[in-house]
Image: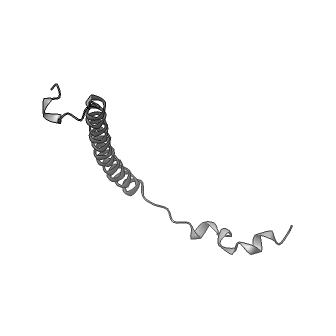
Amino acid sequence: MGDSLSKFPKLQTSKDQLEITPLSQIDSEVKARSMAETHFDQSSDLQLQTRHCYHRVVHKLTSNSRPEGSNLSDAPS
């Protein structure tokens, strides 16, 4: 039990090895990251809307197709 920490030498860090990041740098990183996440959320939201619209159109086309094999041009618009 006593030598279990010797398997993980990277976990044994002293306090003077820890870096202290200035608060202004953390603040700017958080702002940049949140802006990137917002942009990603908007693009993925647009992909979801596009996919939903595509599935709706495909469902409408397949549900309106008649068994006698009529053309799509005379389907009600």
- Examine the image and state in which quarter residue 10 appears: bottom right
Identity of the residue furthest to the front in this view: 68
- Examine the image and state in which quarter residue 54 appears: top left
Please give the name of the residue rendered at 82% of the width and 72% of the height, measured from the top-left corner.
Answer: 3
List x then y, in percent, for residue 74: 13, 29
User: Of residues 67 and 13, which is closer to you in this image?
Assistant: 67
List x then y, in percent, for residue 36: 32, 51
Please give the name of the residue rendered at 41% of the width and 54% of the height, measured from the top-left corner.
Answer: 26
User: Of residues 15 and 29, which is closer to you in this image?
Assistant: 29
Identity of the residue furthest to the top in this view: 76
Position of 48 compared to 7: left or right? left
**Picture quarter with the C terminus:** top left
User: Of residues 21 and 41, which is closer to you in this image?
Assistant: 41
Please give the name of the residue rendered at 62% of the width and 66% of the height, measured from the top-left corner.
Answer: 15
Position of 75 compared to 59: left or right? left
The answer to whether 76 is drawn above or below residue 4 in the figure is above
Please give the name of the residue rendered at 29% of the width and 43% of the height, measured from the top-left corner.
Answer: 42
